[in-house]
Image (tube, rainbow, N blue to C red):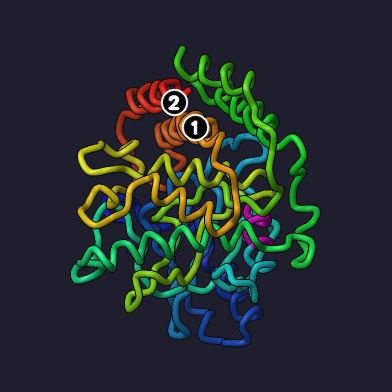
Amino acid sequence: MGPATGTSTATSELVPTGRLGPALVAATGDPRWSDVRAELISGGKSNLTFLLSSPAGEVVLRRPPTGDLLPSAHDMLREARVQSALAGTPVPTAPIVLADPGDLMGIPCYVMGRVRGHVIRDTLPDGFACTGEERRALSFGFVDTLAAIHQVDQDAVGLGDYGRPTGFMERQVRRWTGQWEKSRTRDVPEVEELGRRLAARIPAQQAATIVHGDYRIDNVVVDPADPGRVNAVLDWELSTLGDPLADLGMLLLFWRHPGEPNVSSLTPGITQLPGFPGRGEVAERYATATGTDLGDLAFYTAFAHFKFAVIAQGVSVRARAGAMGGQSFGDLDHEVHAVAAAGLALL
């Protein structure tokens, strides 16, 4: 992750370093954290992410955006909890340095260790994954990590109460319909029709697992020396217990073929490059690893379109209200419409 460009630097209101420094000293036992600086990191469309640096090193802080927040959104302590619980499992996560319920900033936040590696958005780093073999390794390592998330025993890691998996997709459609009602600024018939059709044809759930909720290529840190190795999975804001195929549907939403446009200006796009496997091969890789039946996959991919349309609408509203640390994402109205229309086509 790199510092944001074209945005305001962190202010004392966003990151009160005078209070944060002593808390980091207490959490780490290293007095050098008393001299801490904060810089906004680019890429965060929902919560705000800051690089904290000091003579002791670098860590990363996550906090909600400013302004009014939608109910149940931006739950920082859930993010910290799931990452801590997954430590020691095959799922790589960043170590949690401290989690604060609101004493430091007046809102919940957490600090995690900085995991070195590539966060890949719309371009591949120079000299990285240049060959078709390396690009397939990158793709399959990414998919295999999702399969690893879904194969964790949630009870064994203390996450048995992390969500209510029964009736998960019904509640998800209802939840994101409600989020749309709270954040919409105009009528978009495609979004509303997609929500109605999804609610009418929810498939039987095959499994109940930990669900990441926003699993895409720029939410993992890839090892610079090994494209097939994920060093950490990031951004657990939407994680819960539920239907794992919701994660696969979201992954496939962002997995674009050569010549296809990106889903949105908010999302990265590298899988259009030569050498990356197609959506079908990616889905089959996941199915082989987990033993999952993909017969209802179109529903889950359509739901991903619905969810992303609502997320894009929320990003647009927060950015216009100045709640995203000075970041601007342009006019997203057309993208909300186009993503929902594509979801309808899948059904």
Q: Which residue is mark 1?
A: 298
Task: Count every numbered label the image shows and give the total.
Answer: 2
Which image quadrant for residue 224? bottom left
In the image, 162: left or right of 301?
A: right
Q: Which residues are magenta?
A: 76-82
Q: Which mark is residue 346?
A: 2
Near mark 2 (Cα within 10 A), the count class, few <14, some 14-19 or many ≥20, is: some
Which image quadrant for residue 124? bottom left
> Can you give x and y, in whole percent of width and height, for residue 165 in the image?
74, 43
**Overall secondary structure of the magenta stretch?**
helix
Who is closer to the viewer here, 73 or 286? Answer: 286
> Can you give x and y, in whole percent of width and height, for residue 12 in the image?
48, 58
Residue at 43% across, 43% down: 252
Residue 222 highlighted magenta (yes or no): no
Amino acid type at circle 1 is Ala
Residue at 46% across, 12% down: 189
340 over 328 or under it: above or below: above
Who is closer to the viewer here, 61 or 178? Answer: 178
Residue 78 highlighted magenta (yes or no): yes
> Can you give x and y, in whole percent of width and height, for residue 347 in the image?
48, 22
